[in-house]
Image (cartoon, grey):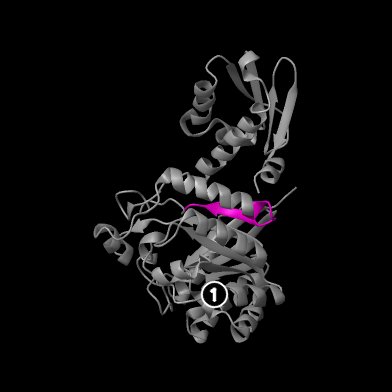
Amino acid sequence: MSKSNYIVPIFVPHKGCPYNCIFCNQKRITGQAKDLTTNDIDKMIGEYIKTIKKRDANIEVAFFGGSFTAIPMEEQNKYLKIANKYLMNGDINAIRLSTRPDFINKEIVSNLKRHGVTIVELGVQTMDEDVLLKSGRGHLISDTEKAIELLKEEGFIVGVQLMVGLPGDSKEKCLDTARKVVRQKPDFSRIYPSLVIKDTYMEQMYNNGDYKPFEIKEAVDICKEMLIILESNSINVIRIGLQPTEEMQMGKSVVAGPYHPSFRQLVESEIFKDMIDTVLSFLNMESIKDVTVCFNTFDYSNVIGQKKTNIKFFNDKYPDTNFIFCTSNINKGTVLVKTADLTKGISKSEYYRLNI
């Protein structure tokens, strides 16, 4: 039986970062307006652990905020020592953090290892130099490549955070970023469609007409293709889209952009729609009156689509065919298409092979 995973999130918004990226307002994104003291962190970890009742649990303390290793080393160590205390006591299983690629070097990596950190996420954002420059990132592609290489050499689990639709970005640049990331072989990734957040320079650009975010359909299409590239190369994509919070909603902190509280579901639904349509494309649909689509219960929402959009798509595309969608005891990530004459299935991995 697999363990249940729990993350104890500790946000250190914009602390230590020497840059002000045009898209960034960490305090709005995290919903946390004040910096945390060491006592705050100790109390948060302790209280969170008390709420976990499952014995077979994997608990990780995560320092989020994107620039942890840019904090002065003495301050880093204060935070890490607290987390390490819980690690040594067996109360948690791992310590992870997110940081910038240009604040990874041998000294920093050695210090992280001494304090028991095993997972590092890098704010890569893009592998296009022009987009990095226009976004005010302050680092180069070479910084990202060196950071991933060093972390992997030292045995860390490495994640990369990517952004879609920054100033100067395009579909081609996003897909090229995914392909370049594959060559670096990180362990996992997150994909974030770029949103215009209040009180950022990107908001000024948007208001002045100097920046136009991707439309949601465009962002979904690009993220779908990036997901295929990454997952077909064994890079697990653990999140697509920002975590929705009370603050992170359109009309509140989000001014414009491809925001949706269930963005990943939109992407996954497009993949399942394509999978079903791929099977149907091999059939003579003009002569088929009934089609049954079977899938695992776990995939129900993704197969049906938001507000049953996938059902509507097939009813509209094949108006003379009766479609029945039903759950079945088959593998997750697989669909079976049944007609009177045949049954044909397709898995995500097979679909990926057809689309890379």
> Residue lying furthest left in this view?
208
**Looking at the rendering, which quadrant does residue 178 occupy?**
bottom right
Q: Does the magenta stretch include residue 237?
A: yes
User: Badge 1: how crowded within 10 Å, few (<14), some, or many (20+)?
Assistant: many
Task: Work out whether 73 lies above or below 98.
Answer: below
Stretch in magenta? 230-241
Q: Measured along the vertical axis of the image, is residue 52 above or below residue 204?
A: above
Asked whether 220 or 20 is in front, the reply is: 220
Please indicate, yes or no, whether residue 87 appears anywhere in the rendered image. yes
Q: Which amino acid does label 1 sit on?
A: Pro
Question: In the picture, residue 235 is in which quadrant?
Answer: bottom right
Residue 16 occupies quadrant: bottom left
Which residue shows up at 37% across the image and 54% down it?
213
The local secondary structure at tag 1 comes to: helix
Residue 204, image x, y percentages:
27, 63
Give percent across and percent down for residue 264.
Answer: 52, 46
Count of marks overlaid on the render: 1
Verify whether residue 67 appears in magenta.
no
> Is 350 on the left-hand or right-hand side of 129?
right
Residue at which label 1 appears = 101
Report x, y in % for residue 117.
Answer: 63, 73
* Residue 67 image position (x, y, % from top left): 48, 74
Residue 261 visible (yes or no): no
Q: Which of 4 and 321 is in front in this view?
A: 321
